[in-house]
Amino acid sequence: MLADLVAGALEDAEERRRTRSLAEVEAAATARTAALDALAFLKPAERVKVIAEVKRASPSRGALASIPDPALLAASYAEGGASAISVLTEGRKFKGSLADLEAVRARVDVPVLRKDFIATEYQVLEARAAGADLVLLIVAALDQPALQHLHDFVLELGMTPLVETHDAVEVSRAVDLGARLVGVNARDLTTFELDRDLFGRLVERIPAGTITVAESAVLGVADVAHYRSAGADVVLVGEALVTGPDPVATLKEFLSV
Ligand SMILES: O=C(O)c1ccccc1NCC(=O)[C@H](O)[C@H](O)COP(=O)(O)O
């Protein structure tokens, strides 16, 4: 399934490249003002921090929320205290787009993450051109030379890579990169099974000084507390925020942990 998601994202990027060349996207990326220092926004604090996600749909859950105005949702996340906004830009299964990211960027003053299935420099440049400050790199989707290359390329463009892992080998690959922001996704991206205890099992393998992000499977404040007590600096939350009646109230509850 992950391989299908990556293949689909690459096909879509190739399609966009037919009308927007690498040189054009490079020029647009260069024209952007500098990316925000996401590590400063996400640095460990007395209370947990939240990356709040704009997520319309997903392969595991289908349609979640229509989100006609992603910038409005992101603005309410920022007002509610989110330290960064994640925008799913994949179109086929998540119903997102780079236009969503660009709209969010124009509205909020906190860092914005391009959450997609990134495997090429072109996609990284697109992220910067749309105003992203952070780019997700999924270890399971890339071999180590490609992962290292994209990690360094994201940094060269002034952005921060969020390196996503799901097992001990992937954590050690993230550490080898010198990653400073490491996510542990509770969701197996092939089976979609959720394991909220995975973060706690893997965190001791992540060096001190690295900012840790517990991704997925937060449905309530108890899940945030669970990740926090296991040592998470940051939690990344999608479904609970977009499906609840009051995302700001939910966010504030999560931020009290
Ligand atoms: O959410 C999915 O079903 C999914 C399936 C395959 C690849 C990625 C997927 N989601 C991306 C994410 O990592 C989540 O959107 C993010 O961590 C938030 O998760 P949640 O709070 O559980 O919505």
Image (cartoon, grey):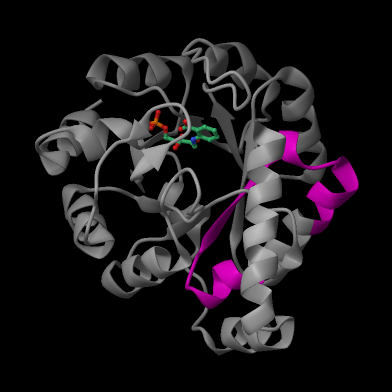
Residue in the foreground of this view, choosing between 90 and 218: 90
Residue in the foreground of this view, choosing between 156 and 164: 164
The answer to whether 67 appears left or right of 57 in the picture is left
* Residue 46 appears anywhere in the view: no
- Residue most extreme to the right: 145
Compared to 26, does 215 lie above or below?
above
The answer to whether 225 appears left or right of 60 in the picture is left
The answer to whether 191 appears left or right of 205 in the picture is left
Q: Position of residue 220 (x, y in %)?
A: 24, 20
Which quadrant holds residue 139?
A: top right
Q: Does the magenta-highlighted stretch encompass residue 143? A: yes
* Residue 102 appears anywhere in the view: yes
User: Residue at image x 10%, y 35%?
Assistant: 245
Q: Which residues are magenta?
A: 125-149
Compared to 114, does 233 lie above or below?
above
Q: Position of residue 63 (x, y in %)?
A: 32, 37
The answer to whether 189 appears left or right of 38 in the picture is right
User: Residue at image x 75%, y 28%?
Assistant: 170
How many marks the image carries: the answer is 0
Q: Position of residue 51 (x, y in %)?
A: 38, 44
Tell me the quadrant of the picture where the C terminus can be found: top left
Compared to 242, does 224 lie above or below?
above
Residue in the foreground of this view, choosing between 148 and 98: 98
User: Residue at image x 51%, y 84%?
Assistant: 32
Which quadrant holds residue 191?
A: top right
Q: Does the magenta-highlighted stretch encompass residue 106? A: no
Tell me the quadrant of the picture where the N terminus can be found: top right
Q: Position of residue 156 (x, y in %)?
A: 72, 70
